[in-house]
């Protein structure tokens, strides 16, 4: 019987950009993208207590829109 390979979780790579330490390269890439578009942003601006669901800390806040943005990578295939 051939063993089935088990996929190990991919760990994010912390990345610095504009004085922020992003939790992942993907978040930092979005910050670069927002800058390229001239969109003002703040990173992990404010957390929210969702009661029994726990705390939620959105990745970005775009104050000119106003809009919260959560960055998620693709699910592994």
Image (spheres, rainbow, N blue to C red):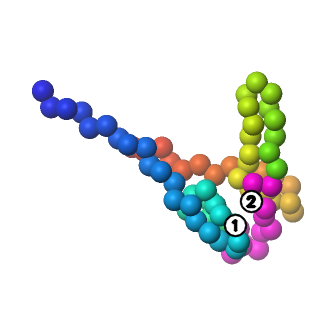
Along the horizontal axis of the image, is 65 left or right of 43? Answer: right
Residue furthest top as drawn: 52
For residue 69, say whether it is visible.
no
Question: Dot 1, crowdedness within 10 Å: few (<14), some or many (≥20)?
Answer: few
Q: Is residue 72 above or below residue 27?
A: above
Secondary structure beneath dot 1 equals strand
**Disc 2, SS:** strand
Residue 38 picture quarter? bottom right
Q: CA distance from mark 1 to mark 2?
A: 8 Å
Write the residue at 70% across / 73% down.
18
Q: Are marks 1 and 2 in contact (CB under 8 Å)?
A: yes
Name the residue tied to disc 2. Answer: 43
Residue located 15% across and 31% down the image: 2
Coordinates of residue 37 in the picture (x, y in percent) = 72, 72
Q: Is residue 56 found inside the magenta-colored segment of the image?
A: no
Magenta residues span: 32-45
Q: Position of residue 23 (x, y in %)?
A: 61, 56
The residue sitting at 71% across, 72% down in the picture is 19
Can you tell which quarter of the image residue 25 is in?
bottom right
Q: Nearer the viewer, mark 1 or mark 2?
A: 1
In this figure, which residue is indicated by the disc labeled 1? 20
Mark 1 or mark 2, earlier in chain: 1
């Amino acid at each position: 019987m051939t063993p089935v390979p088990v996929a190990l979780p991919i760990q994010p790579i912390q990345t610095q950009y504009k004085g922020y330490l992003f939790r992942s390269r993907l978040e930092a890439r979005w910050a670069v993208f927002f800058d390229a578009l001239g969109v003002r942003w703040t990173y992990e601006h404010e957390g929210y207590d969702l009661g029994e669901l726990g705390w939620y800390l959105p990745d970005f806040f775009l104050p000119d829109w106003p809009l919260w943005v959560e960055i998620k990578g693709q699910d592994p295939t």
